Amino acid sequence: MEKDTSETAAKRRAGESAAERVEDGMVVGLGTGSTAACAIDALGRRADAGLDIRGVATSFQSRERAKAAGVPLASLDEVDAVDVAIDGADEVLEGGNALVKGGGAAHAREKIVDAFADDFLVVADPSKLTNALSHPVPVEVLPDARTTVSASVEALGGDPVLRAATRKDGPVVTDNGNLVLDCDFGAIDDPAGLATALAGLPGVVEHGLFVGLTDEVHVGDDDGVRVRAL
Ligand SMILES: O=C(CO)[C@H](O)[C@H](O)COP(=O)(O)O
């Protein structure tokens, strides 16, 4: 069992707060990462207590977590709608509607589910909040497009680094069989413009800038949870 440090308690509170938004009969998008996992665990407890929900996983990891927590699962093509999606972020812009996601290399499926959801709730601890996005933007690319996309990212002013695996030699391979370039642009003045430019590069499957998609941000801290509606 993970020790409940200040950061893990903040993540737990954020996850539990967002999970409370889920109502009987809903289809719920299940995000990826340690904060989203807290929401999945809370949903599992609510399902145990009788809440009728179906979860749509955004990754292998979130599917496994949901199975362990007892959240009934459906695939995206089995549902007509996703009522609410709950997902974490690597950076959350204060005073705006933009995130950097993809620390778990799951941002392609996350964006499909989060964007499709009627309500997209972001869960975070305070370390994720920033007044200017500057986290490297993960860009999932087809393996053949690694060098061409890298050159295009450099032309856009970014510094692309192929994400390496930690427990194997070679690169991270996504759930979709692709590679990830972590692209450092420094401070990102125009997230929407950069998002459009990255999406237009041939060979890019998806990038981790989520602009204009979020409906609520749940930030846990030592005392409770602050909810910001967007
Ligand atoms: O985008 C993600 C995965 O692709 C995660 O939501 C993001 O990396 C945050 O993870 P954590 O809650 O563990 O800090």
Image (spheres, rainbow, N blue to C red):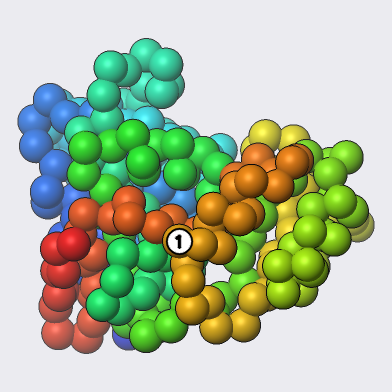
Residue 182, percent across and down?
70, 65
Q: Is residue 142 left or right of residue 198?
A: right
Q: Is residue 51 left or right of residue 156?
A: left
Picture residue at 72% right of the left edge, 72% below the top: 158
Picture residue at 14% right of the left edge, 63% below the top: 229
Taking the view exactly as shown, the residue that stands out farthest to the top is 78
Q: Within the image, what quadrant is residue 7 found in?
A: bottom left
Quarter placement of the N terminus? bottom left
Residue 141, percent across and down?
74, 45
User: Is the C-beta of the residue carrying label 1 under 8 Å from the nearest atom of ligand 1?
Assistant: no
How many dots with numbers? Answer: 1
Q: Within the image, what quadrant is residue 119 found in?
A: top left
Q: Within the image, what quadrant is residue 74 found in?
A: top left
Residue 114, percent across and down?
36, 43
Q: Is residue 197 left or right of residue 64?
A: right
**Helix, strand or loop at disc 1?**
helix
Q: Nearer the viewer, residue 59 or 94?
A: 94
Q: Nearer the viewer, residue 137 or 168?
A: 137
Say whether residue 26 is visible: yes
Say whether residue 34 is visible: no
Other residues around mark 1 within 10 Å, as few (<14) / some (14–19) / many (≥20): some
Quarter placement of the C terminus? bottom left
Picture residue at 37% right of the left edge, 14% below the top: 78
Picture residue at 31% right of the left edge, 17% below the top: 79
Q: Which residue is mark 1?
A: 192
Residue 152, percent across and down?
79, 59
Which amino acid does the dot numbered 1 rest on?
Ala
